[in-house]
Image (spheres, helix red, strand yellow):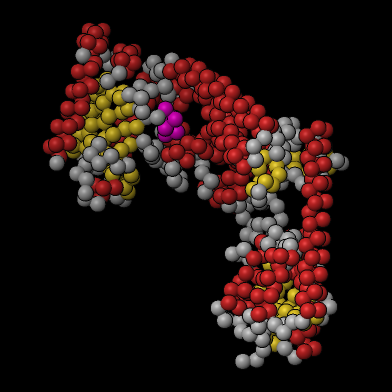
């Protein structure tokens, strides 16, 4: 087998990729091989190129680094003894301190690899002498010292920039969020990108997930932020959408950071009003609340006709979630809801047509604080609740992050910030409690008027109803006795609310909570005599409903 040479090329920043670094290093390798009549491996498998990887930090030697791949091929014998490794200079192999870099370099030579530094045409082999060793040590020491001094200067410069940003709100230069640009020494919004961000928030609040939003943006032909060097596909992805939705720089905040033990941590409190705010606070926090809700309920991708009971309804027998089953278009086919275990023949619960489920859902909505679905005044209070919930989530996340930072590097400043966030948490929880009490007084007075205004047809209307019930913590257990006969138990984490019996087209409610009795009386479903009787036996009715369900369950078994 003829002796082969392998070229290793590295540059540590994306900016160098735009210049002449690659061409220069590659041409030097080709010229060397031509002069010495050595075959230069050119296939993709034996091309070793590390773009944007620092040799000072040793990133070119991590699991994804190409130099690491070359060393692995040497160790397993794929690249044999006597092969050449061509590098521009020894600092391309390492800028780490000599005590780390030298043993690795010598291991390479002892494996029979001949290392050529193209800048001075020096050849290092396993038969190295003391002079070769001294020269290599000098090169490695110089490379490490240069990188160390450069790193210290950069660190000092950034410390100064951060100090001026905090005390004078002085811009950091061109280093800024992708929706801003530096114009005459000040940050200015890029209008087209701001409009894209506003659209992303609108879609997130409407319930579209981080998997759906990128597809919608790509479908519209919306340009991505940044250059092709950083986004090779030129398309939106879930990661980029997620980063935008959670970025507090949209509110104008700048969070200085520094590296502690190799971990990027917050450096003091955020600087407010540093960037131009492009998203209102209430919109930002509403989006955070909706994102949290989606994570909790694991809402999947959306279809044109949103499953209005998604994540709400469970099987009374096996406690499994109920899912849509499409058996074709009417009149022969229909859409049903059924638990996964029943579809496999394990559970004995029956299936229910989606139209019957939705009729019951309309009835359920009249018994909970659902006026936000049809009434703008109450909807404003609901928006305030979503905003407060989002703020509470954000404060909790920041407190968790700062507690982790404090564990890594304790400081009085961090302890003060954590205490301040705890106080803010208490304030937000009190506000959340107040809004909960306000919303609890909002009930449906006229069922006919409510049904007339209720939208369970459009995607937005169906999603709004689903999201509301999830925020209220409502769950529904169902037992299907026959195709036209079902029992539903409606409850929250705190209490059981009521049972619904749906036979043919008749829906009847059996209250398990005094507040539901109030609503039934208000809706004219029960008279004063009935109310007095029901109040007297409310607890017995709860037990009765449980017995009925148990009896039906036993019958099906």
Give x and y (percent) for residue 487.
23, 31
Whether residue 177 can be seen here: yes
Horizontal relation, residue 120 to residue 464: left or right: right
**Magenta region, residue range:** 466-472
Q: Residue furthest right?
A: 184
Quadrant of the rendered image containing residue 232: bottom right
Residue 213 counted in the magenta span: no
The N terminus appears in which quarter of the rendering? bottom right
Residue 282 can be seen, yes or no: no
Most common secondary structure along the magenta stretch: helix
For the residue pair 459 and 166, the one nearer the viewer reads as 166
Q: Residue at x 71, y 56 (%)?
A: 227
User: At 55% across and 78% down in the image, what residue appears?
Assistant: 76
Image position, residue 270 (x, y; %): 70, 34
Residue at figure coordinates x 47%, y 24% from the top left: 372
Depth check: 46 or 83 in front?
A: 83
Q: Quadrant of residue 28?
A: bottom right
Which residue is nearer to you in this view: 45 or 182?
45
Q: Is residue 356 above or below residue 71?
A: above
User: Residue 38 lies in what quarter of the image?
Assistant: bottom right
Q: Residue at x 52, y 49 (%)?
A: 211
| In this view, 33 is above or below 507 | below
């Amino acid at each position: 087998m003829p002796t082969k040479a392998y070229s290793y090329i590295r540059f540590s920043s994306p900016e160098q990729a735009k210049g002449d670094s690659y061409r220069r290093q590659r041409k030097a390798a080709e010229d060397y091989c031509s002069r010495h009549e050595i075959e230069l491996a050119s296939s993709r498998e034996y091309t070793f190129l590390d773009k944007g990887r620092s040799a000072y930090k040793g990133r070119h030697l991590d699991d994804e680094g190409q130099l690491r791949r070359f060393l692995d091929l040497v160790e397993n014998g794929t690249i044999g003894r006597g092969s050449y490794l061509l590098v521009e200079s020894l600092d391309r192999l390492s800028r780490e301190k000599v005590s780390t870099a030298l043993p690795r370099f010598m291991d390479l030579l002892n494996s029979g690899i001949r290392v050529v530094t193209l800048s001075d045409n020096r050849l290092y082999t396993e038969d190295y002498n003391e002079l070769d060793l001294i020269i290599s040590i000098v090169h490695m020491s110089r490379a490490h010292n240069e990188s160390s001094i450069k790193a210290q200067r950069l660190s000092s410069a950034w410390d100064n920039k951060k100090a001026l940003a905090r005390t004078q709100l002085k811009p950091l230069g061109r280093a800024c969020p992708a929706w801003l640009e530096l114009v005459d020494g000040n940050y200015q919004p890029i209008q087209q990108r701001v409009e894209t961000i506003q659209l992303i928030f609108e879609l997130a609040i409407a319930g579209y997930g981080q998997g759906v939003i990128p597809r919608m943006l790509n479908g519209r032909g919306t340009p991505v932020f940044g250059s092709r060097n950083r986004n090779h596909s030129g398309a939106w992805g879930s990661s980029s959408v997620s980063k935008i939705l959670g970025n507090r720089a949209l509110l104008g905040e700048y969070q200085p950071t520094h590296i502690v033990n190799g971990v990027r941590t917050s450096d003091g409190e955020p600087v407010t009003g540093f960037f131009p705010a492009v998203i209102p606070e209430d919109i930002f926090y509403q989006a955070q609340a909706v994102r949290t809700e989606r994570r909790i309920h694991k809402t999947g991708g959306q279809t044109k006709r949103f499953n209005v009971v998604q994540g709400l309804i469970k099987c009374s027998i096996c406690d499994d979630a109920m899912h849509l089953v499409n058996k074709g278009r009417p009149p022969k086919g229909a859409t049903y809801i059924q638990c996964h275990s029943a579809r496999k023949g394990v559970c004995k619960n029956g299936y229910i047509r989606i139209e019957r489920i939705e009729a019951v859902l309309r009835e359920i909505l009249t018994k909970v604080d659902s006026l936000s679905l049809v009434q703008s005044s109450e909807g404003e209070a609901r928006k305030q609740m979503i905003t407060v919930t989002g703020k509470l989530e954000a404060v909790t996340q920041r407190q968790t992050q700062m507690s982790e930072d404090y564990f890594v590097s304790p400081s009085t400043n961090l302890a003060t910030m954590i205490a301040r966030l705890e106080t803010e948490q208490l304030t937000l929880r009190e506000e959340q409690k107040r809004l909960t009490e306000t919303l609890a007084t909002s009930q449906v007075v006229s069922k006919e008027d409510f049904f007339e205004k209720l939208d369970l047809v459009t995607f937005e209307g169906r999603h709004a109803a689903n999201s509301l019930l999830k925020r209220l913590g409502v769950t529904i257990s169902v037992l299907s006795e026959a195709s036209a006969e079902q029992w539903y138990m409606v409850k929250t984490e705190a209490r059981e609310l009521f049972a619904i019996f749906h036979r043919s087209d008749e829906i009847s409610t059996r209250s398990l909570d005094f507040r539901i009795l109030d609503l039934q009386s208000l809706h004219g479903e029960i008279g004063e005599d009935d109310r007095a009787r029901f109040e007297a036996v409310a607890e017995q009715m709860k037990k009765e409903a449980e017995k009925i369900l148990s009896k039906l369950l036993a019958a099906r078994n």
